[in-house]
Image (cartoon, rainbow, N blue to C red):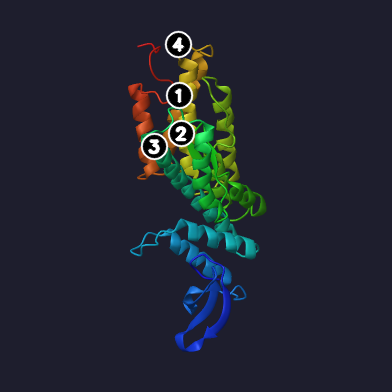
Amino acid sequence: MALAGEAVEILEEVEENDSFLVFVHSVRGLIPRAAVVMLSDPAAAAKLLAAAWGYEQPGLAPDRPNDLAALWLYDCLRERFPDSKYAPLAFYRYGQVADRLAIQASRELNQAVEALKASPGSPKVLDETVLRPLEDKVLSRYAARGLKLSWSHLGGNCYYDGEVYRTLVNRFPRSAWADNAAFALLRRGEHLGGWEGWPTQPLKELGVWREFMVKYPKSELLPEAHLQIVCLDRALHEIYSFPQSEFRDAKKAAQHRQAAEDECRAILREYPGTVAAAQAEKHLAEMTEGIHIYIHGAGWSR
């Protein structure tokens, strides 16, 4: 297997060149030994992970970063070596790369749509019959490398469904990367529904984030979880205090305002000098200044 992210058929070893004669894409050629991983090699999983990570890093070479190559190598590792000590990290990195590629695909598709709009004689209304071929063209390039992306007409973006995160949490619940995967699932909104000015959904989300903190008490992502709770408490304060809301409740509004402030002070105390602390201080300042983060516009009492 070539570390450029291709499966190759090795025809023979060429000792004088320290390389292999290989067959790939109907072409024969020489590949340096260092660029090939033999899947029978005891260190194959480690080599695949190291190569995939290398393709994620920026560099002077024109092919770096190369997320598609990294994705393929992570996929190979998790499929060929599911019991390896590196498998949990391969699952997590696959998800991170897939999410990044979904953003890249969104840009490509939106650029294609804008180019179509600007072209002479383009239809005034871009309905599904016009957009579908564009979607298929962009997404097929990623599908060819094994990545299934979907297009959200509502959000106007491509997305990856996060299957590897779910697998990681379920298959490797005690791994060092389980909390990262659980966090990624929460951030992608699997537990979410529309708020529509109601307190029901943000209250549910508060419970989900608190469960995360209890389940992963040593996670390095706890500061981010704290900040999610601050945002939710602030939003609930606004929902319960908005003058025109049917849920107006001064007592509950005060409770959530106090909870948000307490959470901010806990962040400042536990994570001083960090970005999380700066964000917490910003939240406190905004609450003091009466700046809203959820309900904006007219209707507030002055």
Q: Point out which mark residue 243 bears.
A: 4
Disc 1 residue type? Arg
Residue behind mark 1: 257
Along the polypeptide, which appears first: circle 1 or circle 2?
1
Image height of 34 relative to 280, above or below? below
Q: Secondary structure at mark 4?
A: loop
The answer to whether marks 1 and 4 mark residues whose Cβ atoms lie closer than 8 Å is no
Mark 3 or mark 4, whichever is nearer to me: 3
Name the foreground residue: 257 vs 243: 243
Of residues 114 and 160, the one nearer the viewer is 114
Residue count near mark 3 (Cα–Cα under 10 Å), binned few <14, some 14–19, many ≥20: few
Which residue in the protein does label 2 denote? Answer: 263
Q: CA distance from mark 1 to mark 4?
A: 16 Å
- The amino acid on which the numbered mark 3 sits, given as a three-letter code, is Glu
Tell me if 220 is positioned left or right of 182 in this view.
left
Q: Nearer the viewer, residue 293 or 63?
A: 63
**Callout 4: 10 Å neighbours few (<14), some, many (20+)?**
some
Q: Residue at x 54, y 60 (%)?
A: 72
Please tell me whether mark 2 sits on a helix, a strand or a loop: helix
Disc 4 versus disc 2: distance between alpha carbons? 25 Å
The residue identified by callout 3 is 114
The residue nearer to you, when weighing 48 against 289, is 48
Gap between marks 3 and 2, in whole Å? 44 Å
State left or right for residue 169 relative to residue 273: right
First in residue order: circle 4 vs circle 2: 4
